[in-house]
Image: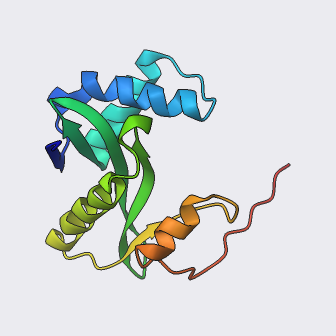
Amino acid sequence: MMIMEIRLATNSDLKSLISIKKEFNEEYGISKSNSFISCELSNYLGKGIIVIAESDSKIVGYLTGIIEKNLYETTGYIEEIFVSKPFRHRGISTRLKDRFIEFLKSKGICICRIDVNPDNPALAIYKKWGFNIDKYRMSLRF
């Protein structure tokens, strides 16, 4: 049986996080340099949170999130969830989400949000997790 550790990332994880983030970028056709990825991840470690899934000391999945505050509420916001292909369909993304929610609860935050395109297959997973559509976001490109 595979032992999976789910934990909050630290600065010492940065180098290992770059390779899993590159895998994410390749899967979604995004081209960014290692230095850009490093800067992006460092920003999360400084201003947000990264939850990682680790198997045999290798990062196989991650969740990036932030805490958002406005005049009315403070919420947690999931920016990205990614699990390496060989490790999918094992409940890892659910465990990443659960750890993020534990973190939010420890900060007294009781709302978590995620944005998803209506045609994204992950929508079914988010609904299974208990997320509900509570508003529609509209965009204007020009």
- Image: 90 above or below 26: below
Q: In which quarter of the image is residue 121?
A: bottom right
Horizontally, residue 6 falls left or right of residue 85, namely left
Can you give x and y, in whole percent of width and height, for residue 141 in the image?
A: 82, 52
- Identify the residue at image location x=18%, y=69%: 107
Extreme residue toward the front, this view: 1
Quarter where residue 61 is shown: top left
In this view of the protein, which residue sits in the foreground, 1 or 61?
A: 1
Camera-side residue of 56 and 40: 56
Left or right: 88 in relation to 107:
right
x and y, in percent, of residue 57 in the image: 15, 29
Residue 30, quarter of picture: top right
Identify the residue at horizontal 67%, vertical 69% (top origin): 137
Residue 133, compared with residue 81, is above or below; it is: below
Residue 31 locus on image (x, y percent): 59, 22
Classify the position of the N terminus by image quarter.
Answer: top left
Q: In this view, does 83 lie above or below 124?
A: above
Q: Residue at x 17, y 42 (%)?
A: 2
Image height of 31 relative to 115, above or below: above
| Residue 67 percent location from the top left of the image | 34, 62
Q: In this view, does 103 lie to the left or right of 117?
A: left
